[in-house]
């Protein structure tokens, strides 16, 4: 398929219309009006999808702008997202978040800039104070922004329940740091909400400390997540004593 910028040249050279080159009257009409910077009426997203392979990003942006806003659905934008500019997608995403929330941008999240996703996620958290409202796009949030969010959520609530919804997306070191602080302040029970996401060696360290202080009852909540040898060694040591 020829580049749109060459269609007029080809049309004049072969003395044929753009419609004839493209083999589709409507597609030719849309393309010709784009070339001449003329407004286009009644454009559908299906027509946009058909013509995008020969358009540049800015031209696709312009064409989508002619589609009735009431007909624009996120899944349709996702189908042409690879052909749209970063600026258009980011601006479209911001409108969606303002109107409906973060969940609505999920279909186009892979095509958005990291800056856009970080800004929208932090804005939603600032407005709601609920990390659960951000969890749907956690895989696309930058490491630095996600760590800021979990720090804020934990400091605000003082409980690990507030961050467990994104625990699987946090690096082990950061999660371990928060978990150890929670353990030092509230004991084993404080760590339980994110125990499935912590490294076994870290849980083992906490378990050994809790055993020394409180015995077996002290580690009961996290026993499914620790090394069984710790309990065996503890019991064996009690028998010897």
Image (cartoon, rainbow, N blue to C red):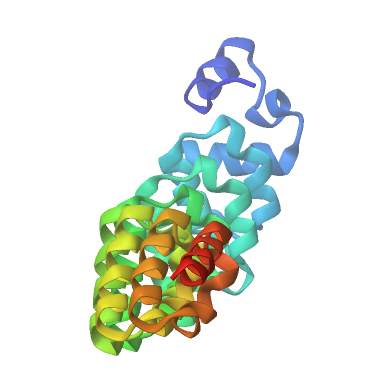
* x and y, in percent, of residue 39 in the image: 49, 54
How many numbered discs sit on the rendered protein?
Answer: 0
Can residue 101 be spotted in the picture?
no
Can residue 11 be spotted in the picture?
yes
Frontmost residue, 137 versus 47: 137
Residue under the image location 35 percent in, 78 percent down:
124
Residue 223, quarter of picture: bottom right
Quadrant of the frame with the C terminus: bottom left
Residue 149, quarter of picture: bottom left
Residue 138, quarter of picture: bottom left
Frontmost residue, 135 versus 227: 227
Left or right of 217? Residue 87 is left
Residue under the image location 64 percent in, 21 percent down:
1
* x and y, in percent, of residue 192 in the image: 47, 78
Instruction: Spot the residue most to the front.
Output: 241
Q: Is residue 201 above or below residue 122?
A: above
Residue under the image location 60 percent in, 74 percent down:
70
Q: Is residue 83 above or below residue 106?
A: above
Left or right of 118? Residue 189 is right
Q: Is residue 61 above or below residue 188?
A: above
* x and y, in percent, of residue 171 in the image: 37, 53
* x and y, in percent, of residue 130 in the image: 38, 84
Residue under the image location 76 percent in, 29 percent down:
23
């Amino acid at each position: 398929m020829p580049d749109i910028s060459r269609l007029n040249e080809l049309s004049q050279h072969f003395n044929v219309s753009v419609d004839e080159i493209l083999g589709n009257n409507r597609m030719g009409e849309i393309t010709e009006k784009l070339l001449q910077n003329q407004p286009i009426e009644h454009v559908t997203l299906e027509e946009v999808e058909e013509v995008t392979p020969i358009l540049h990003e800015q031209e696709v942006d312009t064409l989508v702008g002619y589609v009735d806003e009431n007909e624009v659905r996120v899944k349709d934008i996702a189908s042409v997202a690879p052909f749209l500019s970063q600026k258009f997608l980011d601006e479209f995403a911001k409108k969606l978040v303002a109107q409906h929330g973060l969940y609505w941008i999920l279909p186009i999240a892979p095509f958005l800039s990291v800056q856009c996703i970080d800004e929208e996620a932090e804005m939603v958290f600032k407005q709601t104070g609920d990390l659960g409202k951000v969890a749907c796009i956690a895989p696309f949030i930058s490491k630095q922004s996600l760590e800021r969010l979990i720090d804020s959520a934990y400091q605000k609530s003082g409980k690990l329940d507030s961050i467990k919804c994104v625990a699987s997306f946090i690096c082990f070191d950061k999660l371990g740091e928060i978990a150890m602080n929670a353990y030092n302040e509230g004991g084993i029970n404080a760590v339980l909400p994110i125990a499935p996401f912590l490294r076994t060696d870290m849980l083992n360290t906490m378990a050994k400390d809790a055993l020394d202080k409180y015995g077996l009852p002290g580690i009961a909540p996290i026993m499914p997540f620790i090394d069984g040898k710790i309990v065996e060694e503890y019991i064996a040591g009690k028998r010897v004593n």
